[in-house]
Amino acid sequence: MTAFMQSTWSVLAELAPWLLVGALLAALLHVLLPRNLIRRQLSGYGGAAKAVALGVPLPLCSCGVIPAGIGLKRTGASNGSAMGFLISTPQTGVDSILVSATFLGWPFALFKVAAAAVTGIAGGWWVEAMKDDGAPVEDEAPANEAGVESGGGHRIGGTVIPKIREMIDHGGELLQSIWRWVAVGILVSAAIEVLLPQQAWLDLAALGTFGAAAAALVISLPLYVCATASVPIAAALVANGLPLGAALVFLMAGPATNVATVGAVYRGFGRKVTAVYLATVIVGSLAFAVLFETLIGGGALQAGPAHVHGVPWWAATSAILLVLMFGWFGLQEFRRWRRNVRADRWSTEQVAAGEPGGRAVEIAVTGMTCGNCADAVETALLAAPGVQAARVDLTGGTATVWGAAAASTLREAVQDAGFGTP
């Protein structure tokens, strides 16, 4: 247990500073990026290349990139542009680049960026050549869910202080969206270092670059892997004998594909585009794995997953700050879960008793872009007279309220909180 705790702390201290810096850079991109850039002329082969250039630095994993990609299609972007964005964006990002450079070296990190860009452009151009608009996009994913409209419903411009506040909010929301996967990545990395026999990975490495890469592909395709959180896992595998090329496959195919992502792409774009999506990721990741080993190889590895004794004060401070943030995120999710359980229980009891207070009123809410927005709406509704319980659905853009309050009172409470009620 002591060895596991020491390994966990080492990985956390190595990752935390760069994860925080990456969140800051992502917040800068969010504030400085022109508001309507994503909506401009994203069609044709040039539009696909622009969508990839836009998506590569954005810190969106596969859970957040799907509503963003579908939002591009809704706003008039071609299928090729949306597909280029969907393929390239989850593979990398400013936070993932910095963390990859720390654990696996700058040559590896930059090569991964190039691979994400090339596979994104290739997939986008392939779809453009098909001249097929695909299936109609379903209305289940709001266009602003993952930042398609930069800034969402709370964008405040004009002065420096509001911009700084917006940057802090956005950086915090980014970390909140991936904190569980980062935590899992840290723990799995530590477990691999302590528990997994090195011989197992040496046996896999004996399969050769292509064999090891193919095995990594089979493992990573159905799983959800965050581009940032999976880096320490990949670094631990490399430290135990996995070729860097196979780690590249793990970090390309893992973030870009999983069961939920493939299903969403199929519903939004149709069978043909989904086939192109999968083929591009599979063939591209394997090809770049072989190319990396041929051109660069293991000599690119400059840093392992924190094997040094003694942690610099700035790394320790960053690690403690990250742990505190994760604790706060977990507490918020627990409180939200407890409120939902209470709302369900209260509604069931009231309806069973035949009391009119058990009726539910549902209203539409616009401008919500994150969990904090949903919490703000829920708090405002619970404070309204006559409200007994409330639940906010961020994805659907609705709020369900139980009690005796009139719909007009509920809409006024939502508007007073800074959100819209169409």
Image (cartoon, helix red, strand yellow):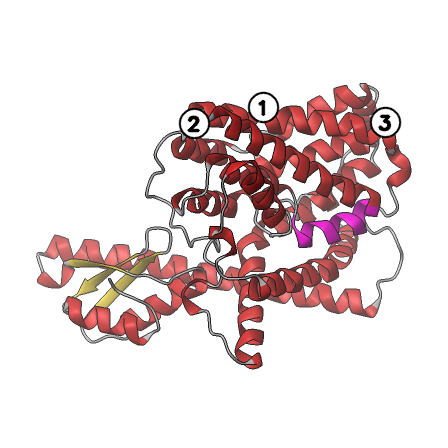
Q: Nearer the viewer, residue 156 or 311?
A: 156
- The amino acid type of the residue labelled 1 equals Ala
* Whole-percent x, y for residue 422 in the image: 24, 62
Label 2 belongs to which residue? Answer: 132
Residue 60 numbered tag: none
Q: Nearer the viewer, residue 206 or 415?
A: 415
- Residue farthest toward the right in the current orientation of the protein: 299
Circle 1 sits in a helix, a strand or a loop, which is it? helix
- The amino acid type of the residue labelled 3 equals Thr
- The amino acid type of the residue labelled 2 equals Asp
Say if 72 sits above or below 279 in the image: below
- Left or right: 284 as drawn, with respect to 14: left
Residue 358 visible in the current orientation: yes
Label 1 belongs to which residue? Answer: 279
Instruction: Please identify the dominant SS of the magenta region.
Output: helix
Instruction: Point out the frontmost of discs 1 and 2.
Output: 2
- Left or right: 87 as drawn, with respect to 70: right
Q: Earlier in the sequence, mark 3 or mark 1?
A: 1
Residue 294 numbered tag: 3
Q: Earlier in the sequence, mark 3 or mark 2?
A: 2
Q: Earlier in the sequence, mark 1 or mark 2?
A: 2
Circle 3 sits in a helix, a strand or a loop, which is it? helix
Magenta stretch? 93-106
Which quadrant of the figure has residue 47?
top right
Q: Residues within 10 Å of mark 2 (few under 14, many from 20)?
A: some
The residues bearing labels 1 and 2 have C-alpha atoms spaced at a distance of: 17 Å
The residues bearing labels 3 and 2 have C-alpha atoms spaced at a distance of: 37 Å
- Left or right: 190 as drawn, with respect to 48: right
